Image (tube, helix red, strand yellow):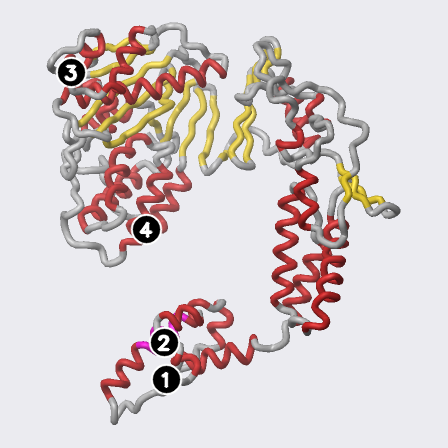
């Protein structure tokens, strides 16, 4: 706060050097002083805790508030020192690596030094030696059982850190094996004069490196027939299959053998501190419902929270989210006085599109105006909320009976961006009848023709299909037949099938011809679909009510909470 006020040349308002002028004799100077004083007074009260701010609400000047704070907090630092000493006494390594443990411990040491007075010059050396000795003892006492200290020799003997990849990895040219850990290790000497130089030798030890004990059960290998776990987190054994999805500290388990899943859960519970939450119902804010028809996922609670925060729970409904053929630009209308509310709302809507692909195009369009939102952009966002109000529980249904064959729809809106004249690419990919991937994105280059824009959309869809085919192969769902890629532009389909470059196609970027490469490799099979049946159309433009509802239903969107 002091640095900020000094930079603004207003430090005198809190140290008393700038006096309050007379309101009667110097009205102009008083008005200027009152403006600056009110601003600084607001800074101080909003920077403090609410309880502290209530204690200074009576103050009329920033100087009075500053003096009040000084009276409260310029006392001795015994409480702060007590809290730091308490943290040091209870701090231990636990599951942290030795480098992380030392970094956090050093942070507490440095914080403690700021509260203590510096010794005199003739006491500096003795003070530093005693401080380093105390820190060494604190560091050693907090280490876990992997490290032991020989008090007779003053040496520290440590085994490999179980969480450091550098210490548990064997020869990089060979897969990990289930060899037992080493029975002994070379001791590493550590000087008590300075603990900091001793850490690099601990991490760069030349002793034989062995995997931790829990590698005996599961072997990480890239071999053809791994016994348990492969690098894609898909343990397989014989005909049984188990898939593991990990997101930070949340884990999902699924497979075709309940016994194998139970064994894996017991293994994880034995090795790690985790909690079994039972069948999947709520994951990363997504609600899951299961029945004989399949699995349904939605974000109904999150959608209702958005409506409640926006004060639109009782608003009148809209049948479709955006006016047909509406094209927003960065210069339409007047600027919003408070752009933060627009940014918060659009940010929430982006997170909602995880289970609502039918609003992806509209939210993507609104997200382009985050830097300077205007009144028409805000009105369009409110209209989307009015549409969500009509079906907050809408989500995706994954049927229990499916053919597990990929098919894709791609489309483009040529010159759809009024500002840059770039085209909009949209695609959706189905696994059988289940929608598994979708996107609405502005193309990187301006296309000279509708066929070129459609061809670029096909190229982007091919990249996504290539990735999905690899993922499905790891999940034991191989795609034997070529994937059907539906496009509503005959010229783009002929360009993909024609191996001859001619006058009308030589200007197209080379990377777009990945479509032809995948076609010749037998990975895709481009097919024509009439525009009225082009499902990707909902990702490229704002449609009318009837066409929008038709395509929405074909995407597999349902609302199990609806009365009808």
Image quadrant in which the C terminus is located: top left
Mark 3 neighbour class, 10 Å CA radius: few under 14, some 14 to 19, many 20 or more: few
* Residue located at (16% from left, 54% from top): 334
* Residue located at (69% from left, 31% from top): 271
Q: Earlier in the sequence, mark 4 or mark 3?
A: 4
Spatial CA span between label 3 and label 2: 65 Å
Is residue 404 or residue 459 the one in the foreground?
459
Q: Earlier in the sequence, mark 3 or mark 2?
A: 2
Residue 417 horizontal side relative to residue 33, left or right: left
Magenta region: 36-43
Q: Which residue is mark 4?
A: 310
* Residue located at (25% from left, 28% from top): 539
| Pointer 2 with pointer 1, Cβ within 8 A | yes
Q: Which residue is mark 1?
A: 18
Tell whether position 38 is magenta: yes
Quick check: 360 above or below 190?
above
Q: Which residue is mark 3?
A: 505
Is residue 176 or residue 194 the one in the foreground?
194
Please identify the quarter of the rendering in which residue 468 is found.
top left
Query: Of helix, strand and loop, which one carries label 4?
Result: helix
Q: Earlier in the sequence, mark 1 or mark 3?
A: 1
Is residue 88 or residue 129 the one in the foreground?
129
Mark 2 neighbour class, 10 Å CA radius: few under 14, some 14 to 19, many 20 or more: some
Query: Of helix, strand and loop, which one carries label 3?
Result: loop
From the image, state whether disc 4 or disc 3 is nearer to you.
3
Q: Earlier in the sequence, mark 2 or mark 1?
A: 2
């Amino acid at each position: 706060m002091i640095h900020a006020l000094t930079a603004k040349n207003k430090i005198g308002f809190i140290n008393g050097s700038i006096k309050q002028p007379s309101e009667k004799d110097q009205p102009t100077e008083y008005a200027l002083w009152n403006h600056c004083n009110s601003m600084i007074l607001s800074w101080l009260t909003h920077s403090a805790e609410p309880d502290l701010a209530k204690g200074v609400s009576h103050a009329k000047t920033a100087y009075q508030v500053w003096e009040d704070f000084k009276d409260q907090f310029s006392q001795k630092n015994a409480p702060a020192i007590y809290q730091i000493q308490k943290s040091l006494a209870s701090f231990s390594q636990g599951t942290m690596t030795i480098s992380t443990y030392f970094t956090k411990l050093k942070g507490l040491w440095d914080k403690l030094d700021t509260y203590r007075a510096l010794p005199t010059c003739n006491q500096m050396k003795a003070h530093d030696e005693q401080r380093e000795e105390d820190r060494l003892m604190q560091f050693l006492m907090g280490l876990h059982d992997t490290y032991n200290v020989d008090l007779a020799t003053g040496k520290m003997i440590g085994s490999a850190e179980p969480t450091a990849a550098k210490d548990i990895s064997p020869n990089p040219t060979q897969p990990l094996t289930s060899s037992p850990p080493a029975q002994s290790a070379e001791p590493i000497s550590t000087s008590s004069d300075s603990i900091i130089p001793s850490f690099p030798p601990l991490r760069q030890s030349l002793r034989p490196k062995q995997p931790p004990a829990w590698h005996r059960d599961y072997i990480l290998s890239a071999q053809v027939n791994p016994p348990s776990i492969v690098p894609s987190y898909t343990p397989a054994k014989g005909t049984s299959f188990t898939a593991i999805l990990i997101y930070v500290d949340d884990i999902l388990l699924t497979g075709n053998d309940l016994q194998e899943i139970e064994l894996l859960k017991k293994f994880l519970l034995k090795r790690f501190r985790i909690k079994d939450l039972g069948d999947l119902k709520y994951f990363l804010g997504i609600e899951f419902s299961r029945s004989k028809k399949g699995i349904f996922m939605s974000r109904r609670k999150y959608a209702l929270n958005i409506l409640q925060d926006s004060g639109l729970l009782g608003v009148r409904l809209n049948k479709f989210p955006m006016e047909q053929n509406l094209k927003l630009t960065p210069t339409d209308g007047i600027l919003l006085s408070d752009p933060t509310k627009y940014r918060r709302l659009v940010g929430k809507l982006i997170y909602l599109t995880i289970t609502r692909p039918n609003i992806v195009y509209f939210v993507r369009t609104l997200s382009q105006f985050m830097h300077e939102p205007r009144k028409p952009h805000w009105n369009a966002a409110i209209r989307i909320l009015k549409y969500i109000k009509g079906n907050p529980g809408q989500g995706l249904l994954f049927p229990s009976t499916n053919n597990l064959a990929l098919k894709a729809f791609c489309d483009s809106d040529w010159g759809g961006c009024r500002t840059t004249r770039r085209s909009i690419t949209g695609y959706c990919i189905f696994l059988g009848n289940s929608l598994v991937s979708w996107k609405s994105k502005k193309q990187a280059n301006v296309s000279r023709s509708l066929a070129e824009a459609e061809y670029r959309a096909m190229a982007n869809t091919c990249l996504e299909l290539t990735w999905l085919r690899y993922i499905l192969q790891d999940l034991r769902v191989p795609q034997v037949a070529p994937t059907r890629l539906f496009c509503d532009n005959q010229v783009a389909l002929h360009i993909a099938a024609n191996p001859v470059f001619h006058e009308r196609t030589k200007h197209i970027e080379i990377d777009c011809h990945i479509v032809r490469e995948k076609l010749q490799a037998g990975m895709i099979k481009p097919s024509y679909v009439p525009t009225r049946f082009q499902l990707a159309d909902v990702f490229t433009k704002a449609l009318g009510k009837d066409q929008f509802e038709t395509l929405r239903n074909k995407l597999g969107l349902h609302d199990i909470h609806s009365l009808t």
